[in-house]
Image (tube, rainbow, N blue to C red):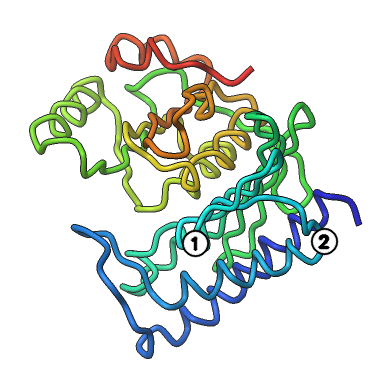
Amino acid sequence: MNTSDIARDACRIGGLKALEFFNQRDQLTIDLKGPQDYVSEADRTVENVMIDYLKRHFPNDGFLGEESVEVKNERQWIIDPIDGTTNFIRGLPYFCTTLALVEQETVLGGWIYDPTRDELYEANRSKGAFCNGERLNPSWRESFATGLVGICHSSKLTADELAGRITGALKRGAILRQPGAAALMLCDLAYGRLDVLFDQHLKPWDSIAGLLIAHEAGAVASDYLACPQWRQTPQITFASGPEIYQEVLELWPEVRDIALLS
């Protein structure tokens, strides 16, 4: 098997393990890491399962996971065992397992598995984006007035700051969505179900895989790794259809300074 095959299997194995826990979530032990920031034994177990599988094939690679200690190397796997943990523990079937491969500060591949819909999204750099093996060919809306906009809730924003961003989009006629799993929202954007996604403070495991998938599907997408401190400091995560991008720049000026994937 090649690297992409192994990554695909690792992501699917992790997602199916997460689904097992989801179906027995009333038995989970849940801890609170911070305000509205939950972690369960499922998160830790799924991440360990994925790392163990990858280590068997790539014993010298590094890892950066949401729930484990970072292992550094030139080639590093970025893992979120369950993106959408709050949904997961509350019984909302909108969560996923994410995996990205970074080498020498460049993202080479991204894999995201939604076990509730059995949808596996993937992209290798410069090779297009796919869902369950079918190439994504999305059609995005051209304006906020006709668009569906995903806005993630950053706990680092004040209520007024978040309200201002939401109000601006609503005034332009947008319909908003905030389903609570940024990686899966990026897949929905890559598929053409969303037209814009924006979050000012997402962590690498939430963003890197999905941004590559969106970019390879043809979206304008931020380059999370452009900041040297991306491992330690949450970055802006942005993607949109190309036609609506200019209107985004008018509405949210902070997007103008974002480095884009190319």
Q: What residue sits right under mark 1 in the picture?
A: 68
Give the distance between the C-alpha atoms of the residues marked 2 and 1, in whole angstroms: 19 Å
Viewer-proximal residue, 249 or 205? 205
Residue drawn at 41 percent across, 43 percent down: 203
Q: What kind of residue is marked 2?
A: His
Mark 2, secondary structure of its residue:
helix
Task: Please rate how many residues cluster around mark 2, counting C-alpha atoms within 10 Å: few if below 14, some from 14 to 19, many from 20.
Answer: some
Task: Please rate how many residues cluster around mark 1, counting C-alpha atoms within 10 Å: few if below 14, some from 14 to 19, many from 20.
Answer: few
What label does residue 104 carry, if any? none
Q: Quadrant of the rendered structure where residue 202 is?
A: top left
Q: What kind of residue is marked 1?
A: Ser
Residue drawn at 17 percent across, 34 percent down: 162
Q: Looking at the picture, how far across and down is residue 238, in whole percent?
A: 43, 28
Residue drawn at 46 percent across, 56 percent down: 66
Residue drawn at 32 percent across, 22 percent down: 145
Viewer-proximal residue, 155 or 123? 155
Q: Looking at the picture, how far across and down is residue 56, in whole percent?
A: 79, 66
Report if the CB atoms under discs 2 and 1 are less than 8 Å apart.
no
Q: Can you say which quadrant of the picture contains the C terminus?
A: top right
Q: What residue sits right under mark 2 in the picture?
A: 57
In the depicted structure, whether residue 104 falls above or below residue 172: below
Along the polypeptide, which appears first: circle 2 or circle 1?
2
